[in-house]
Amino acid sequence: MSLIEKVREAMSGDDRVDAERLVLRLEALSRFLRLVDPYLPDSDLVAAHTLVERAGNRLSLSRDHTVVALAGSTGSGKSSLFNALARLKLSPVGVRRPTTGVAHACVWGPLEPANRLLDWVGVLPRHRFMRESALDGDDEASLRGLVLLDLPDFDSVERGHRLEVDRLLGLVDLIVWVVDPQKYGDRILHQAYLSQFRSHAAVTIVVLNQADRLSTQDTELVLEDLKRLLTEDGLGEAPVLATSAKQPGMLNDLRASLETTVAERQAALRRVAGDLDAIGEPLTTMIGPPAAEDEVDRATVRQLTDALAASAGVSAVADATAGAYRHRAAAATGWPLTRGLRRLRPDPLRRLHLDNNPAETDGVSQEIVPRTSLPEADAAQKSAVGLAVRAVSSRAAAPLPEAWKPALANAARSRTADLPDALDRAVGTTDLGVGKAPLWWRAVGALHWLFLAAAVFGLGWLIAGYGVRLLGLPELDYPEVGVVPLPTVLLLGGLLLGIVLWLITRPLVEWGARRTRRRAEQRLRASVTEVGREYVVAPVREVLNAYAQAREALTTVRS
């Protein structure tokens, strides 16, 4: 079961308004990553993958607890504020605090139900404290479910401490930024942290701690200036409160805000929603306008087909098809006495191993179709194919963001190594239209035999007459056609009609050869086009389809 499925199961029956929509957005982000992972650089997707895993883990854990972090710089009084809210001295304060890089946790309510959540957050068991006890009565009941963390200082000289702060800030549900009157405008605080959480105003509280050191008027001035800075950071909607760990009355607003947050049980959802808003902005740079409707236009496909046809020798095969038509027509319709000599000449198609009869190749696996004898493409033809392949990817990538162009180029080239064999198979299995002799060839051939038989019969009759005269026998009485003896008419008529029939059929054969060439070239180009679509265009369209689906998924993420 995936993380998202676990979240959906864990949140089933949740009556909170945005729970279902939040799961849909997480599912959309997960779907977006599955679609773009094969095509976009991993470094651009690390944050999104981290968010899916982190949000899935958080939402599948305890929803009855709200994890709140106190974050601030050295000397801001975080630990004092932590102890004051807990009303116990749980976190060390003073000079020791900057030297520790671990978080302390105080749990309002039983500790056991929150342990899995704290394990995931990474708070060590010895730094976990349970606040509520029988001695409190109902004093702390309003905060039951609060998990309050005291983080290390984000400006600590120890790099490990800063890394720990950054890690924890990515896991908690709500962040309380603790600033003091002296360093509330610190550049590191605003540039490195607050401005990076501009999408998380709903789960951000900023408190001006140690406000007891200021007069009421000065406090108002500092708060106004702090609000101005937060507006510049994009956190203008985040509440700003004045607090003091030494004056319990100055914690009432912060405590009330925490009580409201704990009671709503919405902070975890709002944090994930804010994370989705934040991650959606950089992801939009990877997704632009819709891909072109025709994806790869006809002119580009035609250019690819022309290059592949030249590489596959389509023109030479078409010429050979026309030659084969003439050769076979002459063998079928020529003078019978010379047909044997015609058969001694090589058939142009058989010479190229292209005597393919569709009836014989039906059901035959392409892998066992014998190779043709066509010459290998030369350097110029290979270069033309490379240019045409690049044109396909460039045309498809034109409306897309720059990040997708390498993926489209790689997709277009992904199967080019297989193109020569695929083209050879395509040419070798294409029906060239010369497998079956036309009926009129047989009719002409029969007439030639008839005319030849008449000529032979007339010649034989004349020879018989000469033989009778040589033997001194009574001369044969030849029937006459007009004044010409019938045997002579048969001999000369058969020969003359044979010549006339040959003269009549010659232009017909030439016309048929040209027609067969055009038809063969069309069929070959159709086969070559299919190869181009399968080996070049189809991988590009697969990327474009992933882009379109990713664009739709990102729209849901940002909704």
Image (spheres, rainbow, N blue to C red):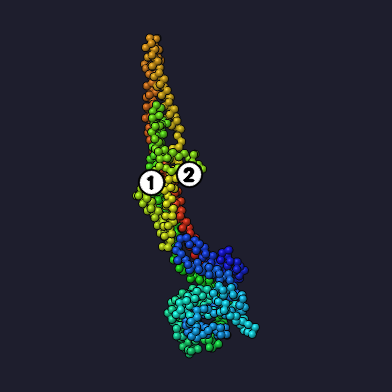
Residue 177 in view of the camera: no
Residue 240 location in percent, x, y?
A: 50, 81
Identity of the residue drawn at 45% across and 85% down? 182
Residue 362 location in percent, x, y?
A: 50, 41
Q: Is residue 547 left or right of residue 145?
A: left
When the figure is inspected, residue 514 is found, relative to residue 460, above or below; the finding is below
> Mark 2 vs mark 1: which is more N-terminal?
2
Q: Is residue 437 left or right of residue 14?
A: left
Residue 186 in view of the camera: yes
According to the picture, the residue beneath numbered tag 1 turns out to be 376
According to the picture, the residue beneath numbered tag 2 turns out to be 368
Q: Nearer the viewer, residue 295 or 70?
A: 70
Identity of the residue drawn at 44% across and 45% down? 425
When the figure is inspected, residue 489 is found, relative to residue 523, above or below; the finding is above
**Could you give the CA–CA distance between mark 2 and mark 1, rounded to whole angstroms?**
20 Å
Q: Nearer the viewer, residue 11 or 73?
A: 73
Residue 408 location in percent, x, y?
A: 43, 58
Type of the residue with mark 1: Glu
Quarter of the image where one finds residue 449:
top left
Q: Residues within 10 Å of mark 2 (few under 14, many from 20)?
A: few
Identity of the residue drawn at 38% across and 46% down? 376
Q: Nearer the viewer, residue 500 or 402?
A: 402
Residue 382 location in percent, x, y?
A: 37, 50
Type of the residue with mark 2: Ile
Quarter of the image where one finds residue 289:
bottom left
